[in-house]
Image (cartoon, grey):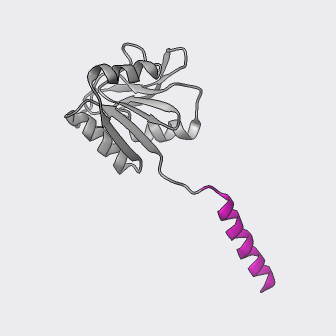
Amino acid sequence: MGRRRSTCIAGALALLSVPALAAETVDVFSTSGCGCCIGWIKHLDEAGFDVTNENLAMADLYMKKTGAGLKPGQTSCHTGFVGGYVVEGHVPAAEVKRLLAERPEAVGLAVPGMPAGSPGMGTSNEPYEVLLVARDGTATVYARYPK
């Protein structure tokens, strides 16, 4: 009995020492009335993220993008921030989770433009790429869709 009780207490103490696993919050900035932005926010919410959304004037939204280190050709209609990274455009939630698990040295992820079939953009087999944007502004392919 004493050994079992010690094991239970040790297990409980181990659980208390682990930080609570809470959903990551993604702060999204978009322009008002953008249906695909709302679709992407819903996609993230359904994947377990807590999502906030603030509508900005286009000039202010552009400043968020460039201030985060995104270059022309890497942008889309909305910009999110999570865990110290920027998430630009219709990035699948699975890639956001992968980014947060791997924690690469980078500005974040981008899906430039608004490719059909990406989260929030409806269904399609149109291929698109998720880019990993480095701190120097260069980008490499992080994932290809459809998988």
**Would residue 104 appear left or right of 130 to someone viewing this image?**
right
How many dots with numbers? 0
Snapshot quadrant of residue 36? top left
Snapshot quadrant of residue 77? top left
What's the magenta region? 1-19
Q: Residue furthest bottom?
A: 1
**Would residue 123 appear left or right of 131 to someone viewing this image?**
left
> Residue at point 45% right, 37% down?
95
> Residue at point 32% right, 41% down?
41
> Residue at point 51% right, 53% down?
22
Q: Is residue 12 visible?
A: yes
Q: Is residue 18 magenta?
A: yes
Q: Is residue 121 visible?
A: no
Q: Is residue 64 above or below residue 44?
A: above
The quarter of the picture where the C terminus appears is: top left
Q: Is residue 93 magenta?
A: no
The quarter of the picture where the N terminus appears is: bottom right
Where residue 3 appears, x then y in whole percent? 80, 80
Type of secondary structure dominating the magenta stretch: helix
Q: Is residue 121 above or below residue 114?
A: below
Where residue 73 appears, x then y in whole percent? 36, 14
Snapshot quadrant of residue 7? bottom right
Q: Nearer the viewer, residue 33 or 120?
A: 33
> Residue at point 42% right, 18% down?
66
Q: Residue furthest right?
A: 2
Q: Is residue 13 above or below residue 143?
A: below
